[in-house]
Image (cartoon, rainbow, N blue to C red):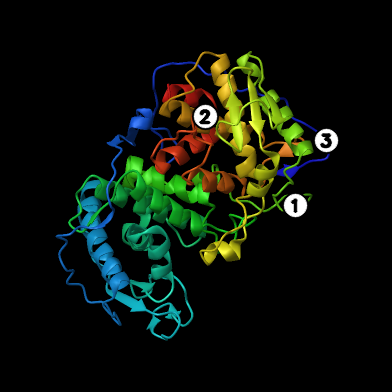
Amino acid sequence: MEQMIPGGGRRALVALLAVAAVAVSGCAGKGGSGPIEDTGAGAVAGLPVTHFESGLKPDAPTPSLNVRNARGGEDDKLATAAIDDVQTYWGEMLPSNFGKQFEPVKSLLSYDAQTDTEKTGCGSVKKLVNAFYCPVDDSVAWDRGVLLPMLRQRFGPMSVVVVLAHEFGHAVQYRLGDKAGIAENTPTVVKEQQADCFAGGYFRWVAEDKSKYYRVSTSEGLNQVMASMFLIRDQAGTSAADKGAHGTAFDRTFAFQAGFEKGPKECAAMTAANVKARLTERPFDKGDQGKGDAKFTAQTVALLKKSLDEAFKGAGVAAPEISDGGSCQTTPPASYCPADNTVSIDLAKLAQLAQPIDRDAEMKGEDPGGMGDFAAFSEVAARYALGIQKGVGASIDNANAGLRTACLVGAWAAFTNRPGDLRLSAGDLDEAIADLLQPESLVSADVNGKRPDSGFDRVEALRRGYLEGSPVCSKQYA
């Protein structure tokens, strides 16, 4: 977060509404911007929460595709099966959704970024650690030497599949033309949002067991996919207007989830106008000397308490106190204590969590040091939000309580996106997502530290609170 100089200008505060146990409701929107109907922690976008090993099916056929320069290793097998599978998906979706017949891509290329100098219509692949679609020769290429094995080893086989599904999304844009609303001057980030969304639509199809190659669980499987998308996010402080901008982790997972929840028509409806209205990618503020990372100290905890008190004062209940040490340590490093309505924190451990992410170490699969200040602030905010929920009579010890809590943290994050002593900074929401995808995260945990199995649901809850405000938290996660 960005620590502001006290005494600055401030807009009128809009208090978060009190949490109430009301019926689930929602309405559809265009361009991935509208809510969907769901049933909380018992389902993932209407599908059951499932647990099994995700990847190639034991009886998956051998693809008959011609791949130039392929070596037949595990990553080539995963990538080739993914291309064949996603082409089957689009062979169904283009006619049924857009009235167009599907045409397979003209060529496929496998290469090793460390040694190969193969060329596509877009140039040489020498030292190119990437996967890409080239419209010049209608080709899809992937680096089997560095990128795909790195993703597979860290996140499992479905991380390879989502990369190829994304790149094929660009091929679909090329085929849809005007029906996708893509023009020569369309910002890169809009094209990338559509491609992430198209990949989400394909993964829904796989999750519904319609694929002859792959199966993916809606818990651990989608968690791995979301984690791999988090890794390949843009660097914090990147502008959405940059020529090569692909989006923050928040933006990319939003688009993927929109496709998974609503399908390819929703993706094609993404335009520069409606994407720009919700993008979180932006440069650091000029006065942000910490580049988005404030020190986690007793002073900033006091500012956090002030921010939370202001945000939740509309609930009309006693605000929890926050103390280092405190009377109970049930879910360290931050615990809500219902007996005396306090949040007990371990300042030292939270300060360690708040250390900036070492991006180089992260990309190498090494310890990134910390998750950033907003991860630590969010864990404390989540425990504080439990106190507010208890005060208004809502449950705080079940899975929906965890999702409701993550949703309220998102609503509080939106509240801080304005002048104040602590202000949301570029990259902060990604830090919250990094925390949410950890098995020990407190941001979506109930009072006992138990969290829903589905990282997809945990991330969505935060996102909905941020974009739609606190009312959706009680309606969606009653």
In terms of image quadrants, where is residue 477? Answer: top left
Question: Crowding near pointer 1: few (<14 within 10 Å), some, many (20+)?
Answer: some
Q: Residue 8, labelled with which disc?
A: 3
Q: Which is closer to the viewer, label 2 or label 1?
A: 2
**Numbered label attached to residue 290:** 1
Q: Determine which of the numbered discs, if any, sits on residue 46 in the image.
A: none
Q: State the CA–CA distance, disc 3 to disc 1.
A: 18 Å
User: Is the residue marked by circle 3 packed among few (<14), some (14-19), or many (20+) residues within 10 Å?
Assistant: few
Tag 2–tag 1 contact (CB < 8 Å): no
> What residue is shown with label 2?
405
**SS under mark 2:** helix
Give residue 122's position: percent from left, percent from top: 43, 77
| Relative side of 429 to 132, left or right | right
- In the rendered image, the quadrant that contains the C terminus is top left
Percent x, y for residue 107?
28, 75
Pick whichever, 299 or 20, lies toward us. Answer: 299
